[in-house]
Amino acid sequence: MIEGVEAFEAGRSSQRELDALYDSAIKETIQLFEATGSPVITDGEQAKQSFATYSINGLKNIEPGGIPILFADGHVRNFPRLVGGPFHYKTPADVYLEIAQRYAHVPLKQAVISPSALSLLYPQGGIRGYSRQEYLDDLLVEQECEIRRCLQKGAHVVQIDFTEGRLSVKMDPSRRLLDSFIDLNNLLIERFSAEERKRIGVHTCPGGDRHSTHSGDVDYAELLPSLFRLQAGNFYLQLASEPDRKRALKIIRDHSRDGQRIFVGVIDSLDPRVETPEEVKDRILEAAEYIPLDRLGTTDDCGFAPFSDDTSRSRETAFDKIRARVAGTALATKILGIE
Amino acid sequence: MPTKGPKESDNTDIRLHRRLRTLYRCNGVFFQAQSEPELLQSICEILVADGELRLAWIGYCENDRTIRPVARAGYDVDILDRVKISWDSIDGGQHPAGVAVETGEPCCLNNIRADPTVSPLGSAAIAHGFSSCIAVPLVARTTQGDMVDLRGALSLYSVAPEPFDESAIEFYVELTTCLTQALVALRGDLAGDLAYDVTTLRAIQERKRSEEALRTARADLARVTQMMAMGEVAASIAHEINQPLTAIVANGNAGLRWLANETLDVEEARAVLKRIVSDGHRASDVIRNIRGSFKNANEERTPLDLSDLIRDTLALLHGELQNHRVSIQCELAEALPKISANRVQIQQVIVNLITNAVDAMSSVMNRARVLRVKSEIDESNHVVVVVEDSGVGIDPKDIDRIFDAFFTTKSHGMGMGLYLCGSITRAHGGRLSAAPRHPHGSVFRVVLPTGEP
């Protein structure tokens, strides 16, 4: 797949050939995902360049040279920057959803990027004739339409990726930036009815890439209390890789509200070792001590390769881990006496 | 301790003077730069301005372990486009910028030719006559004591041999620290700026939501008011229909009595039947009018003769007016130009104005309760409807508010009647006004354009 994209970028293959390659990767991913027995699946974001920039890739008013994001192992991902307005998406997530729906037989969860992440596109020095406020207004319209179309087309849940929560605390320890991120994301979520919000979720993790994270060193306690101010109905939380899970679970218990479903991460997606179903089961039973069963679900800590050039984990490992999650969840379900 | 000779001392003075000038200029940019690219480019330009350095460039680390130049100034700047500068260890050596980024320390090559670890850029640099180079990482300590590493470096090239002595290195490290702090300050406003914009957007969104809620409430109230008006109209209709029905029954009974007589008076029977038929037609007309009123209930606009509409409306409200002992004076213009309007809505305006007039006169006991309804055409060729009453009048302090939503002086009023009248009139391109009437009561004027609004 990576070679295919490189060949396209070097002009050695056509758009048609690239699309065919994406199509076959999505089809294969969905088949393998369904085979794990997972009740809800994704397309593995096979056709996205990255989880954060899929919608803007190829836009003429986007250039390199935005905010650099440093990872613990020293590598860096530079966010692009906006150079002019108005702002419109090039490829919204429902395009990917439609392709996935051709092959899926079980409900699909569709990931979209958060307004807070894309707010970082706007350069701090400003853009002449196009204010940040105008940009944010355009951005919210694009994202509202994207989510609405995903919901209308039948996404089981739309998951807003909010991996910059902990990062924002690193960028601004006063947490003013985090508060602004939460407020901005709520501006989007509040555009949906209470019924629609039941199908909207928020995912957070310390930003995994390769074998590292960009904000794993920031205390989860800095983020979690603010996180549950988000008006979403579902929360997909990294937890398996958390050094002190019980502490995080206590904070989740104390700050999450009725009506907010908590999907705890039971698979550490950065750890190359595949968890056993027993381990997964134990993690769920641990979480069940803090979260009411009718609000508890399971998920993976994060996607297995949020950037298209990340080869740190094989597909086999990823699906083995998902299989462990499904099997472990089944074990825990039996013990907890729920279906 | 050896002392410096006069020439050496002069050179030191010149260097110090240059550095002070450079520092002074850079300080200005640190405070004045509006954007990061502007700041970086200005610093590079200042550094090469006095000729001591041949090339200055600043680069940031990229995803693919390269260093991407973001600002450059001096001679042969295109050299940077021809080589790939890595911050990774590669065969053939690592560029000083890569070393600086990786170690967080300045990397100085005072003799590029003699250094075996020289990077691919080195050979190009030699070809361009550069003989020495220093790279300083963009690192600094914040006022809170945190270490900031922007993952980039400032690289400087010189043609002079051994130009980067201890004091020069110290100077460029200090300068790069200030540059890093200026960059942090420039980026650091993000939280404040975003908070301001998000707060403003929330205020706009909430205002939109409130306006939408108000619009919905107004629409609901309009519907309720219309229903209430319809209720009143229905009572009038019942009254109007009841009259012919009562007459039909009475005439029917009379007919039966005639038929029961031994001698049949055919003429009397015919007269009775004619009255029955006539009353039946009257009832039918009332019903037809009602159907006519509701058929175009929404937005459909048709050519409308306002004088006819006023007559129909007065007929509908006849019972109501009688009950309140209101005498009517009608001055309706004949051959009035037609207006393009929604019949139901304009009728609602007239009903509301007449009902208000009746209410305003209900407490009047010491003078006649007179309703004067007039239609005419004004000098601008607009059709005008005037509704006057001899009621209690409008308190002058309320005159500016009577068309506001929810404003009412009635104990049982909702304050929507006149507001809706105003909305409907405006929607038809017209205007509604009110004024006191001498010596008692009020005058309401509806002005509507003829033809298409």
Image: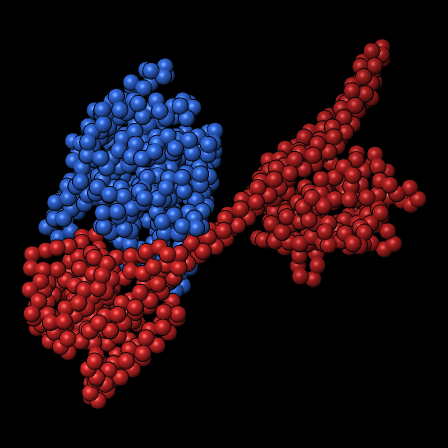
Chain colours: A blue, B red
Position of residue B373 measured from the top left corner of the image (x, y, whole percent): 77, 48
Residue B393 can be seen in this image: yes
- Of residues B19 and B398, which is closer to you in this image? B19
The quarter of the picture where the N terminus of chain B appears is: bottom left
- Of residues A243 and B399, which is closer to you in this image? A243
Q: Farthest residue toward the right?
A: B366
- Of residues A164 and A175, which is closer to you in this image? A175
Describe residue A78's horizontal placement relative to residue A338 as left or right: left
Position of residue B134 measured from the top left corner of the image (x, y, whole percent): 19, 68
Q: In the picture, residue B89 is in which quadrant?
A: bottom left
Residue at image coords 57%, 41%: B213
Q: In the picture, residue B413 is in which quadrant?
A: top right
Residue A146 can be seen in this image: no
Residue at image coords 45%, 47%: A179
Position of residue B67 measured from the top left corner of the image (x, y, whole percent): 19, 59
Q: Relative to B169, say whether A187 is above or below.
A: above
- Of residues A298 and B95, which is closer to you in this image? B95
Residue at image coords 27%, 51%: A70
Residue at image coords 41%, 26%: A290
Q: Farthest residue toward the front?
A: B1
Describe residue B417's horizontal placement relative to residue B136 as left or right: right
Q: Relative to A22, say whether B111 is above or below.
A: below
Position of residue A35 measured from the top left corner of the image (x, y, whole percent): 21, 24
